[in-house]
Amino acid sequence: MTETEYAAFYLVVKDEFCLEESCASLKEQGVDKFFFCIPFTYWSGRLTPEADVDEIKRIGAKFDAEIFRGAITVPDVWPVGGMAIAEAGLRNHCMAHLEKHGYNNVLIVDADEIWRAGSLERLNNVVEDHDPSCLTVGSTSIVGLPGYPVASYQEGLLVYVHVNRAR
């Protein structure tokens, strides 16, 4: 498998810090398929402002990203179990969209994540050697660019999903 067989998926409501830099960090490593899902509402239920949507579209255009609005709104899934369940529900809805359009190997990326040079190659080696349905990795929180570490332990980040096997 090559890096260009990955699709990068972002679930975003606005450019909070470094969406463009995050995309660029993957583009530099060979990813050329980008998907942005913009929910109709924030987790609170407040409508996503069009100015925020326009900013995401402007950044997406630089990477030829497919941009789609969540066909479900957060309040449809929120009452089940909090924000984590709501986010998972919307992400799974988007994964079904990607699978329907032929994308199987998906990188789940947050808009504030910068992938260091070589990260995708290391991930690809694990995928090739172990053929997982999904992968979670640790992270280091940073402030600024190039990045000053501010926390040494964070919860695991879901970074890879093989969409037709991870359910």
Image (tube, helix red, strand yellow):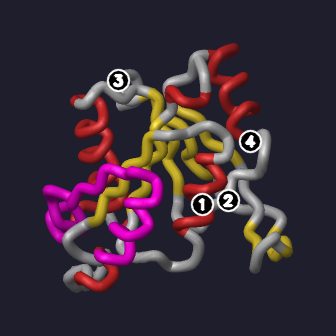
Q: Are marks 4 and 3 in contact (CB under 8 Å)?
A: no
Which contiguous range is marked in magenta?
54-78
- How many numbered tags mark residues here? 4
Q: Using the rendered view, name the quadrant where residue 73 is placed.
A: bottom left
Is 126 situated above or below 85?
above
- Place of residue 7 in the rendered image (x, y in percent of width and height, measured from the top left): 46, 38
Check disc 1 and report the residue beneath it.
22
Q: Are marks 1 and 4 in contact (CB under 8 Å)?
A: no
User: Hey, what amino acid is under mark 3?
Assistant: Asn
Residues 55 and 136: in front is 55
User: Hey, what amino acid is under mark 1?
Assistant: Ser
Mark 3 to mark 2 CA distance (whole Å): 26 Å
- Closer to the chain start, of discs 1 and 2, is 1
- Place of residue 68 in the rendered image (x, y in percent of width and height, measured from the top left): 24, 56
Check disc 4 and report the residue beneath it.
119
* Residue 86 tag number: none
Mark 1 to mark 4 CA distance (whole Å): 13 Å
Is 21 situated above or below 97?
below
- Place of residue 34 in the rendered image (x, y in percent of width and height, measured from the top left): 43, 47
Is 130 situated above or below 111?
above
Q: Residues within 10 Å of mark 1 (few under 14, many from 20)?
A: some
Q: Are marks 1 and 2 in contact (CB under 8 Å)?
A: yes
Mark 4 to mark 2 CA distance (whole Å): 10 Å
Q: Residues within 10 Å of mark 3 (few under 14, many from 20)?
A: some
Q: Using the rendered view, name the quadrant where residue 100 is placed.
A: top left
- Place of residue 64 in the rendered image (x, y in percent of width and height, measured from the top left): 39, 51
Residues 127 and 26: in front is 26
Residues 58 and 2: in front is 58
Secondary structure state at the residue bearing disc 2: loop
Q: Are marks 4 and 2 in contact (CB under 8 Å)?
A: no
* Residue 164 tag number: 3
